[in-house]
Amino acid sequence: MREAYRSDLRHLVEDLVEMLDLVRSGLVDASTALLEGDLALAERVIAADSHIDDDQMQIDEKMIELLARQGPVASDLRLLVAGLRMSSTIERMGDLAAHIAIVARRSHPQLGVPERHREEFQRLGELALGAVTSSAKVISDNDLALAAQVEKDDDELDSLQSEIYRSIARNDDYSSAEVMNLTLLARYYERIGDHAVSLVRRVGFLVTGDTLDSRGALGDPDEE
Amino acid sequence: MREAYRSDLRHLVEDLVEMLDLVRSGLVDASTALLEGDLALAERVIAADSHIDDDQMQIDEKMIELLARQGPVASDLRLLVAGLRMSSTIERMGDLAAHIAIVARRSHPQLGVPERHREEFQRLGELALGAVTSSAKVISDNDLALAAQVEKDDDELDSLQSEIYRSIARNDDYSSAEVMNLTLLARYYERIGDHAVSLVRRVGFLVTGDTLDSRGALGDPDEE
C-alpha cells in the first residue's frame, strides 16, 4: 500500500511534466503559426488546448483522491498542495499559447507581427520556450541549478517586453490594430515566463523549504 | 476539537471574503486614480497590493495546517482544495487592480484614458467591481442566484472589451502609447471579471457538485 502511494506521488510529477510537454508543443506551434501566418496550425493549437484542460481535471482528481485516501502530512502534503497549484499554472500556460494562436488567426491573411518586429518576437518565443522546457526539467529532476536559468530567461523576457513596448510607443506608423496585437502578444509571452518562474519557485520551496526570492513570495512574479 | 475544526472552516471562508474586500477597495481606488489622474492614489493601490499577497500566504498556511491536522475527506476536503484555488485567484485579482494603478501612474500627468473612452472605462470599472462584490457575497452566503449575476457581469465585460478593441482598431488618431495603455487596461478589467466567475463556479461546484458550464470546466473563462 505504502509502495503504491509512493508510486502515485511519482506519477503525479510525471503527469505534470507531460502536461508541460503539451504546453511546449502548443507554444512551438503557436509561435510558428504567428510568424509564418499558418492559419491551419493556429487552429490546431487552439483546438488542442482543451486536452491540456482535460489533463488538468484528471490530475487534480488524482491529487484530491490521494489527499482523501492517504491524509498525507509534512512533505507529502506540501507536494500535493504544490501539485494542485502547478496544474493550474500549467493549464494557464496552455491558454496563453492558445491566445498567441488566436492573434495569428485574427491577423490572417496578414502576419500578426510586422517584419521589423519579427526578430524580437522570434526571440520572445525562444525565451518563453526555453523557460517552459527548463521548468519541466526542474520539476522532473528537482534541478535547482536549472531553476536559476528559468529566472534568467524570465528576466530577459521582461526586458525584451519593455523594450518592445518602448519601441512601439516611440513609433506612430503602426495601425491601432497592429499596436493592439503586438501589445497583447508581448504580454502573453511574458506571462508564460512568469508562470514558468512560479513553477520552479514551488519546486525550490519543496526541495529546500526556502523561497527563492527575498520577499518570501511564492506567488506570481508579475508584480511590482 | 470537532467544534474548533468547524469554526476554523468557517473562518477560512471569512478570510477569503476579507481578502476580496481588499481587492474591492483596491479596484475602486485604481479606477478613480485612472479616471481622475490621481497619482498619490495610484501609488497607494500599488503599495497596498502586498497586504493581499501576505493575506494569501497566511490563509494558505492555515489551510495546509487544517489539511495536515484533520486529514479531511469528502466535502471538507473539497472545500479546502477550493479554498487554496480561490486564494490564488483573489491574489491575482489584487495584482490586476495594481496593474490598472500602474497604468495610471505611467500616464501621469496625462490621463490614462482619453476623454472619448472615459465612459466605456467607467463602465468596465463598474462591471468589474460588481463582479468582485457579488462574488464575495456568493462565497459568504453560498448565494448561487447571485453567481448567475457574476456570469452576466462578466459577459457584459467581455462584450464591452471587444467593443472597445474594435473601436480602437477603427481609429488611427491615437498615439501608439495610448493604444497600448487602452489595450492593457481593457484586458486587466476583463481578467478581473474572469477571475470572479472562476470563484463563483467553485462555490457552485461545492454547493451542488455540478459544474456550471457545459464543458464541465472549473477553469478560467478566458478561453475559446
Image: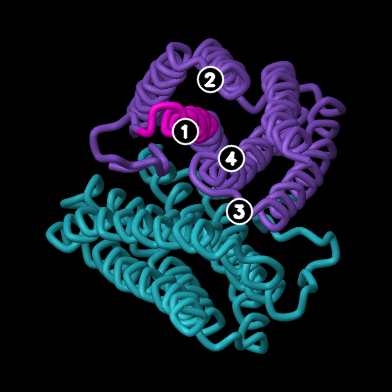
Chain colours: A cyan, B purple
Characterize the local packing of mark 3: few (<14), some (14-19) or many (20 or more) Cα atoms within 10 angstroms: few
Which element is circle 1 on?
helix
Residue that numbered label 4 is attached to: B86
Characterize the local packing of mark 2: few (<14), some (14-19) or many (20 or more) Cα atoms within 10 angstroms: some
Residue at point 53%, 20% (across, down) = B142
Q: Position of residue A51 (x, y in %)?
A: 26, 59
Which element is circle 4 on?
helix
Residue at point 24%, 45% (across, down) = A106
Residue at point 69%, 80% (across, down) = A207
State yes or no: discs 1 and 2 in contact (Cβ < 8 Å). Answer: yes
Residue at point 60%, 44% (across, down) = B80
Residue that numbered label 3 is attached to: A166
N-term-proximal mark, 2 vs 4:
4
Residue that numbered label 1 is attached to: B206
Work out how far the residue at label 3 is from the one at label 2, CA to CA, in angstroms.
Answer: 46 Å
Numbered range of the magenta stretch: B191-209
Q: Amino acid at mark 4?
A: Met
Residue B126 shown in magenta: no
Main SS of the magenta part reads helix
Q: Nearer the viewer, mark 4 or mark 3?
A: 4
